[in-house]
Amino acid sequence: MNVRKLEELLRKVKSEKTTIEEAVAKLKSLPFEDLGFTRIDHHRSLRKGYPEVIWGEGKTSHEILSILKQLKAKGQNILITRVEKKKAEQIQKSFPKCQYYPRSKVLTYLTHPVSSAGKGMILVITAGTTDIPVAEEAAITARFMGNPVETIYDVGVAGIHRLLTERKKLENAHVLVVVAGMEGALPSVVGGLVDRPVIAVPTSVGYGTSFGGVTALLAMLNSCASGVAVVNIDNGFGAGYLASLINKK
Amino acid sequence: MNVRKLEELLRKVKSEKTTIEEAVAKLKSLPFEDLGFTRIDHHRSLRKGYPEVIWGEGKTSHEILSILKQLKAKGQNILITRVEKKKAEQIQKSFPKCQYYPRSKVLTYLTHPVSSAGKGMILVITAGTTDIPVAEEAAITARFMGNPVETIYDVGVAGIHRLLTERKKLENAHVLVVVAGMEGALPSVVGGLVDRPVIAVPTSVGYGTSFGGVTALLAMLNSCASGVAVVNIDNGFGAGYLASLINKK
Amino acid sequence: MNVRKLEELLRKVKSEKTTIEEAVAKLKSLPFEDLGFTRIDHHRSLRKGYPEVIWGEGKTSHEILSILKQLKAKGQNILITRVEKKKAEQIQKSFPKCQYYPRSKVLTYLTHPVSSAGKGMILVITAGTTDIPVAEEAAITARFMGNPVETIYDVGVAGIHRLLTERKKLENAHVLVVVAGMEGALPSVVGGLVDRPVIAVPTSVGYGTSFGGVTALLAMLNSCASGVAVVNIDNGFGAGYLASLINKK
Amino acid sequence: MNVRKLEELLRKVKSEKTTIEEAVAKLKSLPFEDLGFTRIDHHRSLRKGYPEVIWGEGKTSHEILSILKQLKAKGQNILITRVEKKKAEQIQKSFPKCQYYPRSKVLTYLTHPVSSAGKGMILVITAGTTDIPVAEEAAITARFMGNPVETIYDVGVAGIHRLLTERKKLENAHVLVVVAGMEGALPSVVGGLVDRPVIAVPTSVGYGTSFGGVTALLAMLNSCASGVAVVNIDNGFGAGYLASLINKK
Amino acid sequence: MNVRKLEELLRKVKSEKTTIEEAVAKLKSLPFEDLGFTRIDHHRSLRKGYPEVIWGEGKTSHEILSILKQLKAKGQNILITRVEKKKAEQIQKSFPKCQYYPRSKVLTYLTHPVSSAGKGMILVITAGTTDIPVAEEAAITARFMGNPVETIYDVGVAGIHRLLTERKKLENAHVLVVVAGMEGALPSVVGGLVDRPVIAVPTSVGYGTSFGGVTALLAMLNSCASGVAVVNIDNGFGAGYLASLINKK
Amino acid sequence: MNVRKLEELLRKVKSEKTTIEEAVAKLKSLPFEDLGFTRIDHHRSLRKGYPEVIWGEGKTSHEILSILKQLKAKGQNILITRVEKKKAEQIQKSFPKCQYYPRSKVLTYLTHPVSSAGKGMILVITAGTTDIPVAEEAAITARFMGNPVETIYDVGVAGIHRLLTERKKLENAHVLVVVAGMEGALPSVVGGLVDRPVIAVPTSVGYGTSFGGVTALLAMLNSCASGVAVVNIDNGFGAGYLASLINKK
Amino acid sequence: MNVRKLEELLRKVKSEKTTIEEAVAKLKSLPFEDLGFTRIDHHRSLRKGYPEVIWGEGKTSHEILSILKQLKAKGQNILITRVEKKKAEQIQKSFPKCQYYPRSKVLTYLTHPVSSAGKGMILVITAGTTDIPVAEEAAITARFMGNPVETIYDVGVAGIHRLLTERKKLENAHVLVVVAGMEGALPSVVGGLVDRPVIAVPTSVGYGTSFGGVTALLAMLNSCASGVAVVNIDNGFGAGYLASLINKK
Amino acid sequence: MNVRKLEELLRKVKSEKTTIEEAVAKLKSLPFEDLGFTRIDHHRSLRKGYPEVIWGEGKTSHEILSILKQLKAKGQNILITRVEKKKAEQIQKSFPKCQYYPRSKVLTYLTHPVSSAGKGMILVITAGTTDIPVAEEAAITARFMGNPVETIYDVGVAGIHRLLTERKKLENAHVLVVVAGMEGALPSVVGGLVDRPVIAVPTSVGYGTSFGGVTALLAMLNSCASGVAVVNIDNGFGAGYLASLINKK
């Protein structure tokens, strides 16, 4: 039941063509999809201008292009994750202003500048250099959502002094994203040094019993430091997104 | 917004104390919980007289008694699963008409006779004698929901002729619930003999690599017979409930 | 006991060399391998005209073609699952009337029109767009077996209102097939909204700890909604087949 | 087709109301459940005098006693596995001739002497002393089935010379049952020394990553020696039974 | 090297008893434990007055009492998790002002009132009633750390309208803790309805393939909703602590 | 110490250049590697003419050729498992008399006819057609070791009558190898029909929760039939080898 | 063949009753069990005076006492692991000089003083206080085998400065045993700070996804620090024993 | 704060431009990264000349070349693991003196001769020939770090006499690295024969339930021999490195 129909009904009440009882009955049976979620829809419309995020894996460049065109028409900023280089190049032919990050396979398209949205700095840390692609996905996501982002890479726990020399950055961060594969110990150490929320991201880096990141994930879930929560393996986007929600002004 | 408030609003429209625009705005922002789910609620009220099911595990006999009293007042039939014998005895002191089934630890209370609800016969089969408690939970649930139920117990695949001599019962069944632990092979054999839906229930019967029913569960999910679906380990109630839904007139 | 021996026995009855009692006793002890499965065969012959289903994976196009020819000669409708596009194209050269569905990799061949066999509508629902191939396999199977099928795609639980706006379709369905990867939560939500059997199909969609569909499978087995049963990961065919059995007139 | 119908048919043959050909055709389609399994039953009756085996776990002493009485009446030897000491003592009150083996929790009852049934000697070997209860279950089972049995206990691979000094026994064995927990390496070593079938039995002995015998089981399945097969964890009975089948004259 | 020694060294520099080179050398080799972590120590001392948290499991009431005495002397508020009822009662004899929460087994002791520390409201939600103990641990922790906390219990996804009627509370929350066992679907649904960080807590509620909470955990890690992170199974304290860090003014 | 040195020592004893005591001392300290395993070596030499088995996977055709040449020179029959077609073709260029079995990827080379070695018939059974490659590996191995082998293929438990019509073959077998993927139920059914040893071979046939054969393996280990033992997934060779040991005259 | 028989043979050679060829043939077939392992036995006798270690779990106090008596008679020092307090008290009645360590459940009995056997100091470190029982088992074992042992307890990675302040001890250690549960990160940090072998011991400390120590074990196996090896969960004895072997003069 | 700034501060103290109190305050807040880790840095500089190890997997030949250039400039010996053949050839174009080991995919570059660093011989043993690549990685690493290394290949437990004939080498070893796939039993047997530390390396050799080395790993962790510790699957480098630490003079 759309607004026009609703007005019609009320007019009938007003003109006494419909009794109040009849109107109540009709209104009570209004499907919620027409009225009930109005506020949710409204709420969503308020969020317009927010970045849209697309999961690129398994989508053809053709499909991505058609989504891009629709969203561009609505004036939205767009972030696409897991875009293979070849696809990215095909997309950039039609959308030359697209920014592509080959390490993290993220592709962004800005219809308008990103506005500042964060209360503080989001710090993205990795244990090793092989964790950087996942970290970069987190960092790009957080920047794309309007946050200042800093990074510290390759400060794994087997050389703990490398991390300790960055203590100031650690203390300045408002939210921390800690990315690690192998034994996944870095979030525990970081969580013990700071007083801010730590989002741990296990990566599939490793071999043998790293089980594609499961070992790192389990270690992070069992962190002896309080204030640490975990997202799925290699889910840099999810960490960057959650960090942005936490950091939202 | 309840009916009274709605009538009041419509009266204001009728008496022109409120413009149609104002009324539309108000109605659009009606929380769906007041209007939107009316139909769902109505739908639920239609279901009155339906049995209520309570998960008894972890509830004290005191808590169960207080639920029983409420539901009895509403005139509902009640089925409670996983009630330890001691609890059952305490409950029966207050509700002597309660029926308790010690093997399956089910307790039922009828405020009115169960009315016949099924299109055909539901057949509950077990591989071994130790699977009977789970099977009985399924059978009692299905009977409680108004279905004729028959059973064939202890016809596991290591003595396949025992099953084959029951072919007539198999063919007469409208829905089959097949309960098995250990290697969980029975649903595949049954599924190959009949043309009706088979609900497979793995049980935690076994030792060593039976892994508390996981082996049976996996075997059932990989059934080479079509027409087999699986519920959780030891979930006799769930199988009986689903069989009843399938068998509903 | 072969036919010759049987004839001999009957001749003795006829010529009164053997009493009827003796003959009954002898016949009762006939080994089932010689006689016993006739009725099953007969029963199977009654089912002629039923669709035949072939598992295409691992079979060459040559092998599939030879099966197709045999079944076509018997006048049967044929459904082949998991046929790669290349194989399908080779098959279509010989059987140009074959219908191929590239998303679900199903190939069907009709020797006669599908006759209506279902009591109600089968509704196939997916959580995401990447679940559609599996859902399509279910839908094609159910249609091939004579059922009216409707679909609702991409109504995952992270945007629950998308599902709720389809409440009418949900309530009209006689059987529901719910296909989901990742956290596999959709069957629980659907199972809570309807009063009909729900067949849950986990898909291998996801990454990291989705473990190729195991997470979705486990979530579905642990559904807090009653009336849900589960088939193997990506087993769209199995769900469509079971839904058809449940929906059979 | 019941007996009455069968008699009627034969009478028609006798009175020539039905031709022999027609009767043969009808008889061939007799459902096997009425006639077909006679031979299997007969076959089973031939096996009378064979030991009966009962899984004692989960059965009350009362239930076991009633089974014992039935089987004793049939003149069968009986072996009951997994009988707790208390139950055994209660049973021995009624059946004082019962033999109870407390380490392996096996209870046997002989109505007649065990007759020799084996071609050669069955050798039961354990890696450690804690594996002995499972080994004893295998040894008792094999002896109960008429086989000469020898044992070598506590010859685990960490002291390989202990095993090597028993080479003669190893070479004299016709079938070997090798019982081991922890790393489960013994069957591989034994399998490399002999030319006879080796049945490997993993035990739940160990802690931490022994996972209740799963580690031993996996090691045994991956034995680099040919001629080794594996039974379930702690399944001494199964190993003794299979060894007896292999050793049967 | 403590301050006194440092002053002495500087005095020697001043009085030219030590050359600058010698002093530099000495200062360079200062063990970091004496100087380097001063700031960390200082930082920690700033945190004084912060609540202290003790893991009660595996500690005797005697041990807990001695810790309580020490911390009380320092004027700190204290929260102890996983305290069995009996221990709690023994502790309350010495510390009658202790507050004990039997459902969540949390014990708190306040030496001074909790000061308000949170920016917004923390909302704790459960799927079922059996998840409440874990939820309560989260709620108590968050309140103990100075946050306003509200709760919504028993709004699992099988009755999704129960959650939807609480939409206002959901939208008012600054951080959400969502506690669920079984299929663990609730955080995904909540995460789709709100724009704030969601901390998902799997519980060990369930049976069979719930695997003591692992299924819920996996489902949560694979949430199709963005903005969800996960803590260990039954880790209500961790969720409450992290929510407090996020909510810190 | 080689023979020459031993003769020298004895000669010194004979010529009294060495006392008996000295000689005993020397002989006692002889490293067993020179003397001790003589008997084993002897034993092995007795086995000459026995087939040699080579694991072909991971070996180049060059490496396999050089092994073939050595063994051919010794007059041995040779069986090579897991040889890819390309390798086989290269090998056949040098050894045109090699027999290659493409389905099971086995390659055999006979320097002399296989002599009959078995007491009875070995029966190899498969549940499905996709299990045939593994079954063929077992059958070829058993034939290569001198056994009469028969096969029954595609008699899975979902069409149990197909198996039952082969009861005679089942009863004639001296050892049975039962090969099955998916739910792995066939060995249990076969084990219930026969009185002979059953070697169960799980195959990696299946998808989703078949877990590359683990489900079939677990089902087989938990067989409710006695007399069943299991080898590694896809280990057709191992089953054929063990069956041959059991069947050895 | 014992010495007497050997002398006889040599005498026959000497007296030319046996030819050298005959003697060589006889000597070559000497079973190794009589001669071959002499050296191993001798080697073992050399080790006399070495401590004997007994696994106490599953042994009755009676069995332990009889072992103690035998070993005491041989003058050996004895270490018994996993002795419950009650057993220990019973043993101490007969052997009052026994030393019992209740935290680690180790019982030692010295017949002579432990002689110093180590090259350097063995350092045992724990992450938490609950890891101490396992650490103590390692420490006692190492001391019992003659090594100087120091300990650092409760220096888990969430408070990394606690570990760093112990840098001197770390650098003085010749071998390090690092004991940790939960996320098992400590060995990686320690391994990065020292240049000596690190033996990591996972403990079963934790809950939920700690999986009884498996998470810690996996983390340790995936340590990003070189020079770390791992023993079984809770295997303090094994770590202390291996550390002693490494530290042996 | 670097040295220059420190001297400046001291000069100010000397010249009384800064009070001692002010200087103490400044020094106390010196970030430890400038002073605190001096000793660690110094310590590290002492280690100069030590080999550098690079994980080659995932690095391009370009990246490896740039690292090689830097390290060569510092005069260090370099070992790079997991370098594919193609990369190695590209690197050798620029660094023709690089040594490449194709079986183990190790690449080494020596700027100066390796100096002898080991106390004894390191013995590397494999169970099969397919384990040799991992063993070679261990052997090359240990040689590169200055140790004498010997090897025994292909002495798996199914032919235990092959191992026993090498007893002398076993006894001469100071540290043993034992590499095995499949059932992983070899370290237990070796550990029982020697009195020296055994480092067990599981390999991913095998199929089916070898689970890429997990079975071997578990077997090794559960070794019944004392003195065995385990590194990650296929981690030959780690074993060689740890063996070198143990063997360090």
Image (spheres, coloured by chain):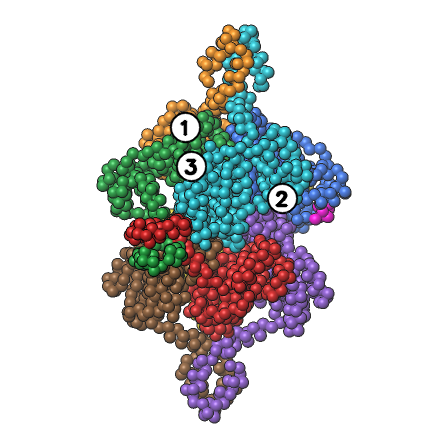
Chain colours: A purple, B brown, C red, D green, E yellow, F cyan, G orange, H blue
Residue H63 image position (x, y, % from top left): 71, 48
- Determine the residue positioned at 43% across, 60% down: C43
Magenta region: which residues?
Answer: H60-67
Identified by mark 1, the residue type is: Leu
Give the spatial CA distance, label 1 vs label 3. 51 Å
In this view of the protein, which residue sits in the foreground, B248 or A245? B248
In this view of the protein, which residue sits in the foreground, C129 or H245? C129
Identified by mark 3, the residue type is: Ile
Q: Give the dominant element type of the magenta stretch: helix, strand or loop.
A: helix
Q: Secondary structure at mark 2?
A: loop
Instruction: Residue under label 2, please give it.
Output: F84
In the image, is residue E185 above or below residue D239?
below
Residue E9 image position (x, y, % from top left): 61, 43
Instruction: Residue under label 1, please give it.
Output: G110
Q: Are marks 1 and 2 on the same chain?
A: no
Identified by mark 2, the residue type is: Glu
In this view of the protein, which residue sits in the foreground, B224 or F73? F73
Letter of the chain that mark 3 sits on in the rendering: D
Residue D119 appears left or right of A56:
left
Instruction: Residue under label 3, please give it.
Output: D246
Q: Nearer the viewer, mark 1 or mark 3?
A: 3
- Determine the residue positioned at 64% across, 55% down: A133
Letter of the chain that mark 2 sits on in the rendering: F
Q: Are marks 1 and 3 on the same chain?
A: no
Q: Secondary structure at mark 3?
A: helix
